[in-house]
Each structure stands twice: as structure tokens, then as C-alpha cells.
Image (cartoon, rainbow, N blue to C red):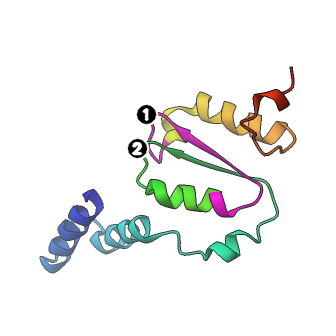
């Protein structure tokens, strides 16, 4: 709902010819945030590289979009950072960097909930 409300404000400002901000750009960006991903699941499934899909639990990207991306990339891992927004790399750089470093420095392994398979 927040993005829809923002887009209405942007449209009003554009109609009013308000030049205090770049309202057209803001409206376009909010549209991308509301409507993406715009990549077909079959295309996501073609990605062969390991991918860390990371978002904040208060991210402007809708959770279902983040999960859809994760579920359709074969070698993807998902991290939802608690209490964070889309700007987690700036607001919590130590945590973000630790997560990214762990992902990049360890061999890819699809997580398994069967604790009997875990390394001891």
C-alpha cells in the first residue's frame, strides 16, 4: 500500500508541475519496486552461478518477489536480514559483509534440514 500511496503523490506532483524533486523518476522507480521481478522463472532457472539473494525484512522489494527469485535459481541461498530495509549494506555493513563473506568463502552447498547429515 505504501508504494501505491507514494505513486499517487508523485502523479499529483507531476500534474502540478512541481519541480522540487524529479517526480517522474521517483514514480518510475516506485513502479519498478512494485512490479518487479520482470524476469521469467524459466530464465532465472538458467542461472548457473551461485547466488546470494539477500533482503531486509522491511525491504521495499516485496517478500514474495525475493522468495520467487530464490526459489527459481538452482544454486541460490536466501538471507533475510531482520530489522533491515533495502539499504542494509549501508545501515548494517558489518552484518551484511559477514553474510556476504561467508557465502563467498565457503563452497556452495544446498542447505539441508536433516541434522543427521550435518558435519559435526
Instruction: Tell me residue 55's x, y (percent).
Output: 53, 47
Q: Which mark identifies residue 58? A: 2
Instruction: Tell me residue 12's x, y (percent).
Output: 15, 73
For the residues bearing labels 2 and 1, Cβ distance under 8 angstroms: yes
Disc 2 crowd rating (10 Å Cα; few below 14, some 14-19, many 20+) is some
Which image quarter: residue 94? Answer: top right
Magenta segment, which residues? 71-87
- Taking the spot 77% from the left edge, 72% from the top edge, the residue there is 46
Disc 1 crowd rating (10 Å Cα; few below 14, some 14-19, many 20+) is few
Instruction: Tell me residue 51's x, y (percent).
Output: 73, 54
Q: Nearer the viewer, residue 63 or 9?
A: 63
Residue farthest along the top direction in this orientation: 120
> SS for tag 2?
loop
Number of residue marks:
2
- Report the quarter where the C terminus lies: top right
Q: Is residue 18 visible?
A: no
Position of residue 103 in the picture relative to residue 41 (left or right)? right
Tell me if residue 14 comes above or below residue 84 in the rendering.
below
Amino acid at each position: 500500500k505504501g508504494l501505491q500511496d507514494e505513486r499517487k503523490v508523485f502523479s499529483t506532483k507531476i500534474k502540478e508541475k512541481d519541480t522540487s524533486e524529479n517526480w517522474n523518476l521517483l514514480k518510475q522507480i516506485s513502479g519498478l519496486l512494485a512490479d518487479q521481478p520482470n524476469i521469467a522463472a524459466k530464465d532465472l532457472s538458467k542461472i548457473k552461478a551461485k547466488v546470494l539473494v539477500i533482503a531486509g525484512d522491511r525491504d521495499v522489494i516485496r517478500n514474495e518477489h525475493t522468495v520467487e527469485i530464490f526459489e527459481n535459481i538452482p544454486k541460490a541461498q536466501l538471507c533475510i536480514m531482520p530489522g533491515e530495509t533495502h539499504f542494509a549494506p549501508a545501515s548494517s555493513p558489518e552484518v551484511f559483509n559477514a553474510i556476504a563473506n561467508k557465502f563467498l568463502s565457503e563452497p556452495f552447498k544446498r542447505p539441508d534440514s536433516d541434522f543427521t547429515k550435518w558435519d559435526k
